[in-house]
Image (spheres, rainbow, N blue to C red):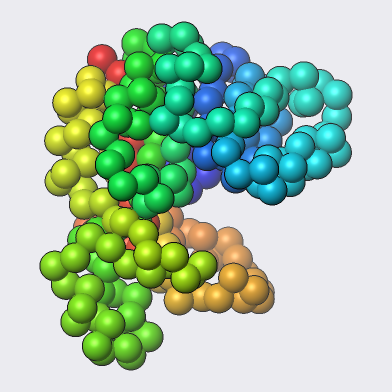
């Protein structure tokens, strides 16, 4: 996903431009810190105190130059209008958040509002068109059958959450003035790998296969996650 994001940034902005980035629901700050190391000014928005503490700890371990480029804010992604001015950011990330939001249209409209013209909106969502894949590949046939025709699923934390369908999100992005320009699949071949799985001897081969599948039909359509990129008009 990081490679996909870098590809979209490189296609939209001049090389070397320092961008203003908002990471909504930044979690432990993986993408925020990665982009700060690349020279960008990053604001991380996170509502979970534990995640925010982890991100702060990781930031404290970075050199001073990187720490100066990162601002951490405790808050909900639905409150972007409270924290930020319209058009304040060149890039807005919202990765792994929409599945926890029952009605995401308002949140998405708020994200588009804080994007500058020509700005990039990057979403990572659970693929609602392929919810039967995980239980089916695991041999859980009752769960696979139950997944057809639904937009909800139980995640690895045991929470009942929501998935998004490509067609519906495409229409939503067009409606908020940040139409879809590119989309990828994420975790096509590796969705069943446990969180503590040992990396293979040649991880680059795994990444290359996932990256190729993530941009190739029909493989990307059955990925566990979808990475959608829209551009503010």
Residue shown at the point (63%, 27%) measured from the top left: 73
At a point 19% along the width and 34% down the height, the residue shown is 172
Give the quarter of the image for residue 225.
bottom left
Q: Residue at x 40, y 50 (%)?
A: 100
Residue 167 is left or right of residue 23, and the answer is left
Q: Position of residue 179 (x, y in %)?
A: 22, 27
Left or right: where 20 falls relative to 114:
right
Asked if residue 230 lies left or right of residue 39, the reply is left
> Total label count?
0
Height in image: 125 above or below 138?
above
Q: Position of residue 171 (x, y in %)?
A: 15, 35
Residue positioned 67% across, 28% down in the render: 72
Residue 219, how many percent across, how many down? 27, 63
Is 154 on the left or on the right of 20, as rendered? Answer: left
Residue 48 figure quarter: top right
Is residue 148 shown above or below 185? below
The quadrant of the image that shows the C terminus is: top left
Is residue 149 in sight in this rendering?
A: yes
Where is residue 188 drawn, in percent x and y? 37, 65
- In the image shown, does 181 or 150 lie closer to the viewer? 150
- Front residue of 80 and 224: 80
| Residue 185 visible from this viewpoint | no
- 52 shown above or below 20: below
């Amino acid at each position: 996903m990081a490679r996909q994001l870098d590809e979209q940034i490189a296609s939209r902005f001049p090389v070397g431009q320092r961008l203003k980035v908002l990471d909504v629901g930044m979690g432990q700050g993986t993408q925020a810190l990665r982009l700060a190391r690349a020279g960008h000014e990053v604001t991380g928005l996170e509502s979970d105190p534990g995640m925010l503490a982890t991100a702060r700890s990781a930031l404290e371990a970075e050199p001073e130059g990187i720490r100066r480029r990162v601002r951490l804010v405790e808050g909900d992604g639905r409150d972007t209008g409270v924290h930020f001015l319209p058009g304040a950011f060149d890039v807005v990330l919202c990765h792994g958040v929409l599945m926890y939001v029952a009605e995401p249209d308002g949140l998405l409209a708020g994200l588009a509002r804080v994007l500058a013209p020509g700005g990039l909106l990057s979403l990572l969502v659970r693929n609602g068109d392929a919810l039967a894949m995980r239980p089916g590949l695991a041999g859980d046939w009752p769960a696979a059958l139950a997944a057809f025709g639904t937009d909800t699923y139980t995640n690895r934390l045991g929470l009942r959450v929501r998935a998004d369908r490509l067609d519906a999100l495409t229409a939503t992005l067009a409606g908020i003035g940040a139409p879809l320009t590119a989309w990828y699949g994420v975790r096509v071949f590796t969705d069943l790998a446990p969180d503590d799985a040992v990396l293979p001897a040649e991880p680059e081969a795994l990444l290359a296969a996932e990256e190729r599948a993530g941009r190739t039909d029909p493989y990307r359509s059955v990925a566990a996650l979808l990475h959608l990129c829209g551009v503010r008009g």
